[in-house]
Structures are given as structure tokens and as C-alpha cells.
Image (tube, rainbow, N blue to C red):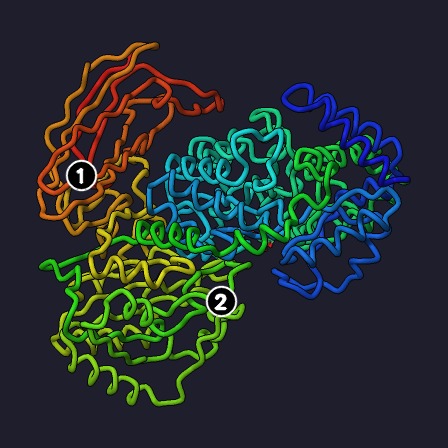
Amino acid sequence: MKREFLCLFGMIAVLFGCTGENREREMDRFIDGLMGRMTIEEKIGQLNLLAAPGDIVTGEVQNHNVLQAIVQGRVSGVFNLKGCDNIRKIQRIAVEQSRLGIPLVFGMDVIHGYETTFPIPLALTATWDTAAVRQAARIAAREATADGICWTFSPMADLSRDPRWGRVAEGIGEDPWLGAEMVRAMVYGYQGEDPSSFATDEMMACVKHFALYGASEAGRDYNTVDMSRVRMFNEYFLPYQAAVEAGAGSVMASFNEVDGVPATANRWLLTDVLRDRWGFDGFVVSDYTGVLEMVAHGIGDLSEVSARALQAGNDMDMTSRAYVDTFVESLEKGRISEEEIDRACRRVLEAKYRLGLFEDPYRYCDPEREKTEIFTPQNRAAARKIAAESFVLLKNENDLLPLRRGGTIAVVGPLAASRENMPGTWSVATDLKAPSTLVEGLRTVAGAETRIVYARGSNICHDEVLERNATVSGRAIPRDGRTDREMLDEAVRVARSADVVVAALGEPSEMSGESSSRTDLGIPDAQRELLEALVATGKPVVLVLFAGRPMTLTWEDAHVPAILNVWFGGTEAAEAIADVLFGDVVPSGKLPSSFPRNVGQIPVFYNHKNTGRPLGDRTGFVKYRSNYLDVANTPLYPFGYGLSYTSFEYGDMALSSDRMGENGSIEVTVKVSNTGTRDGVEVVQLYIRDRVGSITRPVKELKGFQRVSIPAGESVDVSFTITPEMLRFYNSELEYVVEPGEFDVMVGTNSDRVQSARFVFE
Ligand code: BGC
């Protein structure tokens, strides 16, 4: 009976409610009808999200009888369960055995690809290629939906200027504007551009972690955040807002507090800002045990924090089981109202409706697509191309790179022969045995004429406990039983026998990501000693740096002739690294975050304020200026930095006018020439500075960029249009304004190397 009821409504929706308003009206009618039949327990059940039992479980594993709860209608969705068969089985229980047969929603952390894994999000951002990022998300959606998943906990829109925080790996770097571009591309890639309905190969996005999770004190995960509202609105909020405006169907509340109230129970954040200001009309889910954790935050017992979360606008409870355990009693005691439960329940049902689950609860489980559309050669080819685009060439003395084929290459380092390490953190659906090791990738791409020899050289680090903690989640890199001396001697011997050394060093993939904060951002000690020994051989050394965050590379920059930062490039990383090392692909990635000279400089970011005592362009220490006695203010590698195998020169930039009115615009044009011998891609960057404002404004802010492909010896004219929209900011009343006055426009190859001109907005 109940199934017929749901199917009937589903059919009506299909027949009459095809698009737009009609569909929304049909949805309202359908949900009114359904909710009219739901008990209060069933409504509360729709607010309860559980992790998959006995499968890939992230966070703290909990012991609960999920299946029984599904039959009772007390579960809304399950996440991180993999495979059509598994998902079908669980869905069937919900649809056929629960009283109303409401389908479950199946989520997963599809963060940077599904089985075909793309570079970690920070690296995707380093491509500065929104089309590529959208394509990666699109492929992720096609694969995940072929396997039963219709909801991803991505994109992560947390701006961060603190690389001690391990989750910078999952984010969009230090810049609000670049970050906004990236998350918008991801949302469109996952969902398409019409958030009111989903095709069977599109999945619902969840923008997270709202808000400010990337600004935790001291870069320690889950730590307190305290920030001015002006900074929130002008900087940290922009990527979340962009994702919401792109139509993200859901938002995840962050673990941290905002203005003294944990985000999960922060009404100002989840209702005033998110819904009233930005017009969000999807549902909000807590983070993993985020509701329960508010007891430890110290704002009440479980009933109290659960009620506060619901009333603030947190609709769904992820894994705390706090809503299902407390709401009936809270309702009886008048702590919460039925309307509040209804409101949250309706939002969740709306999402299920838009996903088409009432029409066909199995529409994302297509065994045929599961067999033919996952980890395909085409998807892998796209991942390989995008991975190569994400690498950033940090140094290349005397054009050591690209490597020539032929001769002997020594590949050395504890990360060179690992498969599991390649995809990077949060690759939940990846088959960790699928990627090639770097040694294999180099052999494949180099061809038979090149001899590749390998030595491990060291363990990850001397400290066994640290090493164990940084190689978890199936990413074990077993320690070598030999002594440090034996490993080092072998590596030096192998290096001496070669023409060039490729040192594959850095962080193992779980040294960044969730719960992986660090206070030392150097290459771990044992590997650094190995690198010193390799450099001391006198052989040319190329450092292939694996990193989930900006690292401190001051010694390396001074002593190693070539450094290619490869982040974690996904399942095709090894071949992509080889493509770039051998010059089949010319590197074009640019840093999405400044690389500090040392940890003491953190936070160091390009879009800072000027202060009353700026150091400006002066070098060396200046007393009574804002600077350090012992280190420069500048980072080692600035935001937007990245070299190529060719060279680019910028001509003088020209402005179409030096004045702009309210409805006007200014064209900025610059000639960029490829003065080298190889075709290359340059990311041309546009920055603006508001000289005088009612509040202080940053010394520069990215407002545009273009990836331009320039053949060797040729030039292209690159143009940007400056509009008043680009000059707007939130004033101290949090009004979004543009103020008349002088502005600097800057164009260049990175945030530090720009040319500048002035215009007036009147
Ligand atoms: C993370 C989220 C993730 C969730 C579900 C949490 O620990 O903070 O980013 O989406 O787990 O796996």
C-alpha cells in the first residue's frame, strides 16, 4: 500500500511537474501529503544520518543497530557505503520494510574523485583551471552515481591561511576569490546548473564546513575560531556563499565555534546569514558527531544542545543519534516545537524529492553503469591530464628539468615505491592498490632507453610513533628493517651510479587531512638527511615533493637545483609526474597558498592589510616597522607563484581609461610573450587595491585570472574587464558597498611580481 502511495506521487510528479515552478508546487503537494501521514518519530527519523556499518567508516566508529532503525523509519540516510549491491540491499529495506517506505539518501565523501581519483582539492586549486575542476567533479559524480551514491560531502570551501592545519589539503588555499571560483566549478560539476532536479548521473553537493573551520587557533584541528565579522564577510565567507549561489543542495555545519557559539547551534550563522541573507533553501547537516560534541564545547547537555541545533537551523544530525534520542521528550517538555521538527523534516524530504528518489529509489544504482562507467580509460586519462596541470614547479636551476630520456635515473626516497600513498587523503572510494608507484610510472613513461634504478634511502621519519600516525587508513608504508646508515649508504651508491637523481620525498598522504595538524612543516627529518646526502654526491638532484600543505623549504630552495611540488595527484599521479619530469607536459600550476619561510611566520598570506607601520618594499629589518628581527615578511614562494619550462615576458599594461563611473568599466590589456623554446601555459593574474576605504582594505586582492596557452616565440594580448562589482566590499555595517576613490590595478605572473596602474572610481 505505502509503496503504491509513493510511486503514485512520483508518477504525478513526472507527468505534471516537469520543471521549475510546477515541479516545486508538485513537490510541496507531495510532501504535504507525505508529512500528513508521518508520525513524529518518523519525522525525527528523517533528521538522522548514520555512517555505514562495517564498511568504510570515517571518524569514530559507533555501535548501533542500523538496519533495525531503518525498518522503524528512524534513519534518513547512510553514508560511506560502497557498491550498488550494498546500497540496493539497504534501500530495499527502507522502501519495503519501513511503514511509509521513504527512501534513504546515500552519501559519501567523494572529495577529489571516486575510484578515478583526481589531485587533492588544494592541488586542484593549483591548476587555476575552473573547467578542469568542473570536469573532475563531473567525472566524480558520474562514477559515484553509477555506484549508488547521490550525495557528496564536497566541496570544502574552508579558506585557510594556516598550513599547520592538516585540512588545508582538502580546501581551496588562502584566497577568497580563487576559492569561490573553484567551489562554484565543483558544485556545477556535481549537480549541473539546475539545482531543482538531478539527472541520474548528478549528485547533490554539500558545502562544508560552515563556517570558518580553516581558521582554527594555532592550526590545531577542531580548535576554537574567533574572527571579526568584517573579516568573515570580506574573506572567509565568500567561497561558501559562492557554493550556495551555485545551488549546492546542502550545507554542513562546522565543528568549531563562531562568535562563541558552536556553528552547529549558531542561529546567526545557519539562519540569519545562510538563509536570510544568502537565500539558501536546502538542508543543513551537522558534521560527524557535531551535535553531541557541543556537550564538550560546554553549552548544555545532550537534550539542550540538540534543541539548540535544531532551532539554529541544523536540520540533520550526522551520527550523534542525538535528535532521535532526545526530541520526543524535548517536544513533550515544550523545549522544541513540532513546527521546528516539521521545518527540518520538510527540507530533507525536499532534497530527496529533487534527487528523484521518490520516483525511483534505485535510480542511482545502475549495475550496467557500475560495470562500464567507473575507473574507465577515459576518466583516468582526464585525471592524468589534470594531475599534471596541478603540479607546481618551484625551482629549476639551469633548466635541469625536463629530464632527457636515456642514461640512468636514480629514484630515491620512501615515497617512490608506494602505491597507497599516491591518491592522497580522503580518497574514500579509491582502490588503493590501483595507482602505479612513482618508479613504475617513470619506467612506463621513460621507455626502454632509460634505466631507472631505485633505492629507498630512509624511513618516513625517525620517530616511529609519528610515522605510524601519519600512515594510517590503509596507507601503511612499512618501516624498513635496515639501519638508517645502511639505507643511506645504499641510496648514495645508487645515486652515484646515475646521471641524475629524482628524490621522492615529503609527507605521506595521511600527514595532512583531518586530524593531521603539524607544528613542523619541513620535510620529515630522516628524509631531509637523505636529501642532504644526495645533494652532497654532486649529482644533479630533482626533488619531487609530496605535500598536502604548504611546506617550509628554505634549505631545499637554497641547495636543491630543481623542485617539483606534486601534492597528491590521485590514482594517475605517477604517470602524470613522469609526464612532467620528461617534459611531455610543461608545468603550469601556480600556488594557491603562500609557502612560508618558517613556521613562525604563519599566518603569511598575500592579501594582508597594510598596518600603520608597513615595511613596504624595504628589505632587511627596520626598527619600529611591522616586521621580524630574524626573518623577512615575505613568504619563500608567494601566492600565485609557479615556474614553467618556458619563460614569459609581460609588456606594459594599458588601461582603456583611468576613470570609471557606476555603470562603467575599464579594459586592462597586457601583452604576454612566450620567450622560451617550448609551448607553455601562463596563468595571468589581476589584482586590485582599494587605496582608501571607510574600513582598511588589503594591499591587494585577486579579482581575475586567465590561463593562456602561448606557443613558443608567440605573444597574446590578455584583457580583463574591471567593473564596479569587483570593487565592492562589506563595510563595518556589513553592507556590500563600493566607495568612490583611487584604486590600483595590478597584473602579473604571481602575487609578488606585478605591474601596477591607478584609476579612479567616481
Ligand atoms: C569530516 C567531514 C566529513 C565527515 C563524514 C568528518 O569527520 O569533518 O568533512 O564529511 O566526517 O565522513
Q: Position of residue 602 (x, y in %)?
A: 35, 52
Q: Identify which amino acid the numbered label 2 is placed on.
A: Leu
- What type is the residue that disc 1 sits on? Ile
Q: Residue 628 at x, y = what percent?
A: 25, 51
In the picture of the structure, the residue carrying the numbered disc 1 is 710
Residue 558 appears in the rendering:
no
Residue sitting at x 52%, y 70%: 474
**Callout count:** 2
Does residue 11 appear to the left or right of 422 in the view shown? right
Residue at 21% over, 32% down = 747
C-alpha gap between disc 1 and disc 2: 37 Å
Dot 1 or dot 2, earlier in sequence: 2
Circle number at residue 432: 2
For mark 2, does the 10 Å Cα neighbourhood hold few (<14), some (14 to 19), or many (20 or more) residues?
Answer: many
Is residue 590 positioned above or below 599 on the image? above
Between 44 and 292, which is closer to the camera in this rendering?
44
Tell me which residue sits at (37%, 20%) in the image.
725
x then y, percent, for residue 483: 34, 89
Q: Nearer the viewer, residue 240 or 191?
A: 191
Residue 39, image x and y in percent? 89, 39
Residue 645 seen from this side: yes
Examine the rendered structure and indicate whether residue 204 appears above or below residue 643: above
Disc sitting over residue 248 in the figure: none
Circles 1 and 2 in contact, beta carbons < 8 Å = no
Q: Quadrant of residue 393?
A: bottom left
Secondary structure type for disc 1: strand
The answer to which image quadrant residue 567 occupies is bottom left
- In the rendered view of the protein, which quadrant contains the N terminus? top right
Assign a secondary structure to mark 2. loop
